[in-house]
């Protein structure tokens, strides 16, 4: 019998699993597959390319999916929000900056807001803006994030919610890639999970096959949080956020040596972009979390969700025996 | 009914809880209280002061306790190990360097070895030296550690153990301060937990009362990993390890500015040591993990263990209902 939680009840979905709105990787096909398999699929709004976003909503077809934004980037191009809200997404997912005025604009259209946060202080702000769901994202997550860890951030935010806003739903993000992670997140006080790397490693994700192979070959010791990729892409992330990627020779050369990278930026940016296109993983970076060490196959989303939920249910049942 | 695991069976204890052998804080009174309450209590061998260690074993009285060492420090003064092994501790706990030859010396005396590790690579080495227990320590832990997080390191090491050495017992360390953390650690594949900060915040720990109060007032956003405290104490930790402490004005001044600290070292070291003695938490550092945000009281060990285990059992039972 499926794991029923406040998250599944609120969104009317079968499983307490949301797919992370990963920039570039989370297109409409992935989001629709997650929703079809009983989760809540999200398109990654990323850095706000309106044509790409329109294509991805088309690709999702008539499956009900949500959409996520990098909030500081959305602020530079706020009209994108009107486009997306007019499509009546299942939810708006905001991360990496103050959620207003976007949370209010979404609520005005009757669309629920999910705020992903990285600190307890951020969580208090998400409660203030009336987020229906708070996602506590730990540092183990792939891509952008901050320093707090899933294991302590989730229960601390659960306590804050219990004290200040008991109806707010809580999800854990960062490190959840199998049934053990789902079961653990629920024990820590979450109502569900946001899964990134495991869906990135799906047949439906928009990922170069060589990056998939690099991830399969890696273990969890092989990732690092860095700014190097943002420097070469000329994306001005706020100081507090870094991105977790697989280490490679490019990172080993420039991580901790960023000042020097700036003096070689034209050549190195060109080299990185070409490598991204070619899937050259020795130069371009593979955006995955520490959970990469738990991922050994590229599979269709439907299979992944079945395995994760069956494993979580079995683990919880087994541990309850005899106590 | 208590949580029975491979850890409780192996050591013949009631609860799957080991107290972290925290340098300076984990004396004989704390270790004995943990063992008396049904856990496995450890004395912190720290930087190897033989007189202090002898006092602490005396203070533990006839309770059966183990002893932990900072392995690279023990290597500088290996005769300490003979002293400790001659007391027939319940186990030898080794962390922060290659475990040999100490693991073999302990095994030769019939004393089980617990290896705390911070990476998957370390875990493979712990299996190689025949550790009876591997402790996977995540970065959220207080005091010294490394970068991997509990949430992903534990299941990844569980998989390694399943593949290479199925009888090896696994514990989670880093972030476990309440029943939620114990339940989550078990779901991730651990047979038990190593608890640091929560026992540091006990009546029996050797901690200045002002540091206890600073910890109670802090939340989990208030800690940082740094080398500043090791620089002012002139303790030469290997490069890969930093220590998690509460931020304060001293850390804010010198963290990221370590080269400059070296030029003011005599004065700043004197100032830090005096503050440590006085419990001046604006200068000396309070060694706690991210779980400090889950700790709101200083209590006797017996109460802490009862609360943690009752909560863990209740949470697991509650989540199993209806699946």
Image (cartoon, coloured by chain):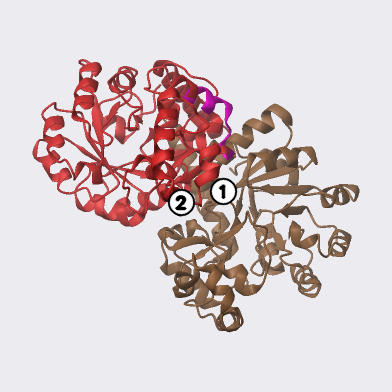
Chain colours: A red, B brown
Res. B49 image quadrant:
bottom right
In the rendering, at what x and y percent does residue B16 appear?
63, 46
A274 part of magenta stretch: no
Residue drawn at 75 percent across, 38 percent down: B127
Secondary structure, mark 1, is loop
Quarter that holds the C terminus of chain B: top left
The span shown in magenta is A211-221
Q: Which mark is residue A258?
A: 2
Judge whether A286 appears above or below B58 on screen. above
Res. A111 image quadrant:
top left
Closer to us: A171 or A92? A92
Q: Main secondary structure of the magenta part?
A: helix
Res. B32 image quadrant:
bottom right
Judge whether A171 appears above or below B42 on screen. above
- Please, which chain is the residue tagged with disc 1 on? B
- Please, which chain is the residue tagged with disc 2 on? A
Q: Are marks 1 and 2 in contact (CB under 8 Å)?
A: no
Residue drawn at 21 percent across, 15 percent down: A61
In the rendering, at what x and y percent does residue B38 appear?
66, 54
In this figure, which residue is indicated by the disc labeled 1?
Answer: B138
In the rendering, at what x and y percent does residue B117 appear?
67, 47
1 and 2 marks on the same chain: no
Structural crowding at the residue carrying mark 1, measured as other residues with C-alpha within 10 Å and reported as few (<14), some (14–19) or many (≥20): many
* Residue B247, visible in the rendered structure: yes
Residue B98 appears left or right of A112: right
């Amino acid at each position: 019998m499926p794991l029923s939680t406040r998250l599944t009840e609120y969104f009317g979905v079968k499983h307490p699993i949301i797919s992370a709105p990963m920039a570039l990787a989370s297109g409409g096909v992935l989001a629709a597959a997650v929703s079809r398999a009983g989760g809540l699929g999200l398109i990654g709004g990323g850095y706000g390319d309106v044509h790409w976003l329109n294509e991805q909503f088309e690709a999702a077809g008539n499956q009900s999916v949500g959409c996520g934004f990098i909030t500081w980037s959305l602020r530079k191009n706020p009209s994108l929000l009107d486009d997306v809200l007019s499509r009546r997404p299942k939810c708006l997912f905001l991360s990496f900056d103050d959620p207003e005025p976007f949370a209010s604009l979404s609520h005005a259209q009757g669309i629920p807001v999910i705020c992903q946060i990285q600190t307890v202080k951020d969580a208090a702000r998400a409660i203030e803006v009336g987020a229906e769901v708070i996602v506590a994202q730990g540092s183990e997550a792939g891509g952008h994030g901050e320093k707090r860890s899933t294991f302590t951030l989730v229960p601390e935010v659960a306590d804050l919610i219990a004290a200040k806003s008991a109806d707010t739903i809580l999800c854990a993000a960062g490190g959840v890639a199998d049934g053990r992670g789902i079961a653990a997140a629920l024990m820590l006080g979450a109502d569900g999970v946001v899964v990134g790397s495991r869906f990135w490693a799906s047949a439906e994700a928009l990922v170069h096959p060589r990056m998939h192979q690099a991830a399969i070959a890696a273990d969890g010791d092989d990732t690092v949080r860095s700014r190097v990729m943002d420097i070469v892409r000329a994306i001005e992330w706020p100081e507090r956020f870094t991105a977790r990627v697989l280490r490679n020779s490019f990172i080993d050369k420039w991580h901790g040596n960023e000042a020097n990278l700036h003096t070689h930026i034209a050549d190195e940016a060109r080299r990185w972009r070409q490598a991204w296109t070619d899937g050259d993983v020795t130069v371009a970076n593979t955006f995955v979390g520490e959970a990469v060490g738990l991922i050994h196959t590229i599979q269709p989303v439907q299979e992944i969700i079945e395995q994760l939920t069956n494993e979580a249910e079995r683990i919880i049942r087994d541990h309850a025996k005899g106590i």
